């Protein structure tokens, strides 16, 4: 796998995690991250992810891959948080 693609995918996942952890309804931490710094970091990581993907493939393909990754990760993160919360209660 191309290093730019791997970097783009990891930066996209990290950006989604920053956006999720800034939410007041997140279930990973006791308190949410500070809103503005986490959102800025999340958006910066997503832009970095697109730049990495665009360096390895065509821009339209990179956009499609990034949007698909964002949809997947932002849909899965709340479920992972709920599973972690269930583990803490036991």
Image (tube, helix red, strand yellow):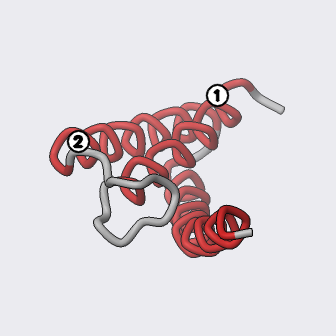
Q: Determine the residue positioned at 57% across, 48% down.
A: 13
Q: Is residue 51 above or below residue 86?
A: above
36 with respect to 28 (left or right): left
Q: Is residue 69 above or below residue 35?
A: below
Residue 22 pos. (x, y %): 31, 55
Q: Determine the residue positioned at 31% across, 63% down.
A: 23
In this orientation, which residue lies closer to the viewer: 21 or 29? 29
In this orientation, which residue lies closer to the viewer: 78 or 40? 78
In the current view of this chain or complex, which residue is farthest to the front?
A: 90
Query: How many neighbours does mark 2 have within 10 angstroms: few (below 14), some (14-19), or many (20 or more)?
Result: some
Q: Quadrant of the C terminus?
A: bottom right
Residue under label 1, please give it: 4
Residue 63 pos. (x, y %): 50, 57
First reached walking from the N terminus: tag 1 or tag 2: 1
80 with respect to 41 (left or right): right
Q: Determine the residue positioned at 42% across, 34% down.
A: 48
In the current view of this chain or complex, which residue is farthest to the top?
A: 3
Q: CA distance from mark 1 to mark 2?
A: 22 Å
Q: Quadrant of residue 1?
A: top right
Q: Determine the residue positioned at 61% across, 73% down.
A: 82
Q: Quadrant of residue 77?
A: bottom right
In this orientation, which residue lies closer to the viewer: 8 or 22? 22
Name the secondary structure under disc 2. Answer: helix
81 with respect to 51 (left or right): right
Residue 59 pos. (x, y %): 50, 49
In the current view of this chain or complex, which residue is farthest to the right?
A: 1
Name the secondary structure under disc 1. Answer: helix
Please identify, in this view, whether the residue under mark 1 or under mark 2 is nearer the observer: 2
Query: How many neighbours does mark 1 have within 10 angstroms: few (below 14), some (14-19), or many (20 or more)?
Result: some
In this orientation, which residue lies closer to the viewer: 66 or 55? 66
Residue under label 2, please give it: 40
Residue 9 pos. (x, y %): 63, 43
């Amino acid at each position: 796998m191309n290093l730019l693609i791997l970097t783009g995918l990891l930066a996209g996942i990290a950006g989604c995690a920053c956006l999720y952890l800034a939410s007041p309804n997140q279930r990973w931490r006791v308190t949410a991250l500070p809103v503005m710094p986490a959102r800025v970091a999340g958006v910066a990581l997503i832009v970095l992810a697109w730049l990495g993907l665009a360096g390895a493939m065509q821009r339209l393909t990179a956009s499609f891959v990034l949007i698909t990754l964002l949809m997947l990760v932002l849909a899965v993160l709340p479920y992972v948080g709920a599973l972690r919360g269930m583990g803490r209660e036991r």
